[in-house]
Image: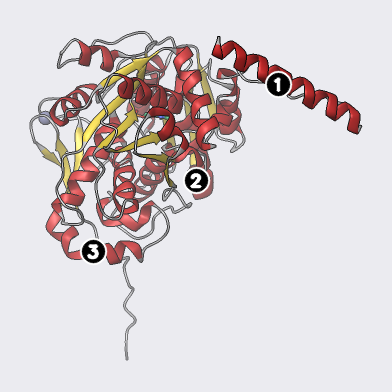
Amino acid sequence: MTQATIAKPAETTTIKSLKCKECGMEYDAKAMHICEDNCFGPLEVSYDYDAIRRQVTRETIQAGPNSIWRYRPFLPVTTDNVIDVGTGMTPLVKSHRLARRLGLKNLYIKNDAVNMPTLSFKDRVVSVALSRARELGFSTVSCASTGNLANSTAAIAAHAGLDCCVFIPADLEAGKVLGTLIYNPTVMAVQGNYDQVNRLCCEVGNTYGWGFVNINLRPYYSEGSKTLGFEVAEQLGWQLPDHIVAPLASGSLYGKIYKGFQEFIKVGLVEDKAVRFSGAQAEGCSPIATAFKEGRDFVTPVKPNTIAKSIAIGNPADGIYALEIAKKTGGNIESVTDAEIVEGMKLLAETEGIFTETAGGTTIAVLKKLVEAGKIDPDETTVAYITGNGLKTQEAVQGYIGEPLTIEAKLDSFERALERSRTLERLEWQQVLV
Ligand SMILES: *Cc1c(COP(=O)(O)O)cnc(C)c1O
Ligand SMILES: [Zn+2]
């Protein structure tokens, strides 16, 4: 008599451990994020790079899914049973008109404003965090969010059939709130800023046993951002750029783009190359930019006050690591005013046809500022990371853009309106010229 053997899911994990970034102590890959037994430093996933090298070539990646999961051996999951909602592989657009306007020759826009399913880079980190949450046996997932993370957690939890409860500051943009509620999670709008929301969530996490994507699952969550580095390298034809500009909230995504590039070098997928890392903050919440300018290696927390709410973290968890990377790569961390952020949003829209949210406006405004200060070489291959979609932060540009010309449904009404608008345009030009 033959007996059927039950096939277990392939355990093809490349995870080695969770490793403390400060003291190096190693832990099992569980739901935890700080070095509880020693120094209370943050934990990071470490991998068996020999195993990755054996599994991965440019060809195996290209033959993989058209999503972040083409890089699965570099991501912290243990089975192939991942949540793939088409996240990642967003366009890397060669910029012509914005590049000319700024005086750059090799500018690219990594456009996560059209990421799936919720139009921000957060879909990357959440796809990874919830895939790992499911492996670890969580049935309820949660997060402390500045807006986009709540959208993404609620949507992907809905897709995966996980219970979901998210925490946001009560004063978020309408589009961000609605873009969470539609998935029908429990939404807690906390009367306080993000840093207060985060503190509350740490307490809730300790007692409720939920999977908080950016707290107890943070080591897994943050690894998702490496795909912003992997994709750019692949899309540039398996080459690294010379310079990147990315927004900084907690500083996590910025550091993980760096880790992504380093891993591709380590396993031989791209040639080693020095990439300069520049970062963007809003002046109304710029603790990392301020520390950089003052030459400090520590970050002093601030109370946020800016229209760039998605990056308004006053006490950034990975701020010191962002400072380190900017310094050692020869990059810069700059901040811009809310008015410059609105101008940045308009500039990207008018020149490239990309409508980004305030965080993207911050990145473009800082890009412009760095070029004007001679801190980006016109010949450098530069990638600006656009991380979110403008339809979610409409309040930011209301009153700063044109209005439709209301006309009757008659040809002569159209013609008069057209003539008026052309006269106006001429007048504006004359004002520019005098
Ligand atoms: C969260 C967020 C960021 C920054 O993320 P960190 O990894 O915390 O620095 C940037 N842009 C947008 C649109 C975001 O939602
Ligand atoms: Zn430690």
Q: Residue at x 26, y 56 (%)?
A: 73
Q: Is residue 317 left or right of residue 70?
A: left
- Looking at the rendering, in which quadrant would you find the C terminus? top right
- Circle number at residue 116: 2
- Looking at the rendering, in which quadrant would you find the N terminus? bottom left
Q: Is residue 331 left or right of residue 159?
A: left
Q: Is residue 398 left or right of residue 27?
A: right
Task: Pick whichever, 118 or 245, lies toward us.
Answer: 245
The residue labelled by disc 1 is 403
Task: Pick whichever, 191 or 326, lies toward us.
Answer: 326
Give SS at disc 1: loop
Q: Residue at x 47, y 31 (%)?
A: 148
Q: Which of disc 3 and disc 2 is earlier in sequence? A: 3
Residue 395 in the image: state x and y as whole percent: 59, 19
Disc 1 from disc 3: Cα separation: 51 Å
Circle nearer the viewer, 1 or 3: 1
10 Å neighbourhood of mark 1: few (<14), some, or many (≥20)?
A: few
The residue labelled by disc 3 is 57
